[in-house]
Amino acid sequence: MQFSSRLPIAVHILLAIVEFDGKEKTTSTFLAGSVNVNPVIIRNTLGQLKAAGLVTVKAGEGGSSLAKAPKDITLIDVFDAVEKEEALFHFHENPNPECPVGKNVHAVLDNKLFAIQDAMREKMKSITLQDLIDDMNKILVQ
């Protein structure tokens, strides 16, 4: 299963904002250098994070900052801010109703996939940006 890179990019941006706070202006160009993507992707992602109330962005050369304490930002907050799809799984809509598998596949699979999706979302609620900052700081010390 493969997800988009939106969540990791958004988390990278948030971690960079924290890491470089007071050291660098975290403009889209600066952040693009850290993430190694085009600044347009950073600007779009920052716009989504801002709309979700997770960051503030000063126009021009002002840079970005967190709008909440890192302990108050969860992975699900970030995921919901940057992912357009609410469902993790895309169900095929037209299985063959004449086939015994096709006519029953949704009945046997859908609820299980929804349960997996719910479990992932619950786990993401338990991981904060502060947890990631703490993990990063442990690595930086080594």
Image: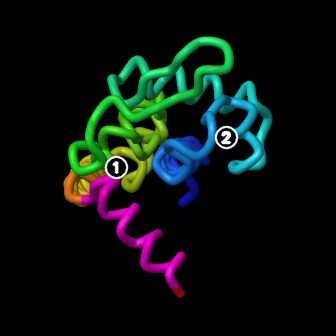
Q: Amino acid at mark 1?
A: Leu
Rendered-image quadrant of the N terminus: bottom right
What residue lies at 23% left-to-right and 50% top-to-bottom? 71
Q: Confirm whether the magenta stretch covers residue 124.
A: no
Q: Position of residue 36 (x, y in %)?
A: 77, 48
What crowding class fits label 1: few (fewer than 14 Cα within 10 Å), some (14-19), or many (20 or more)?
many
- Amino acid at circle 2: Leu
Q: In front here: 80 or 90?
A: 80
Give me the disc on residue 31: 2
Chain-order first, disc 1 or disc 2:
2
* Residue depicted at 52% across the width and 29% down the height: 64
* Residue 63 visible in the displayed image: yes
> Looking at this view, is 86 or 29 the one in front?
29
| Residue 75 circle label | 1
The magenta segment is: 127-141
Which label was assigned to residue 41? none
* Above or below 89: residue 47: above
Quarter where residue 103 is shown: top left
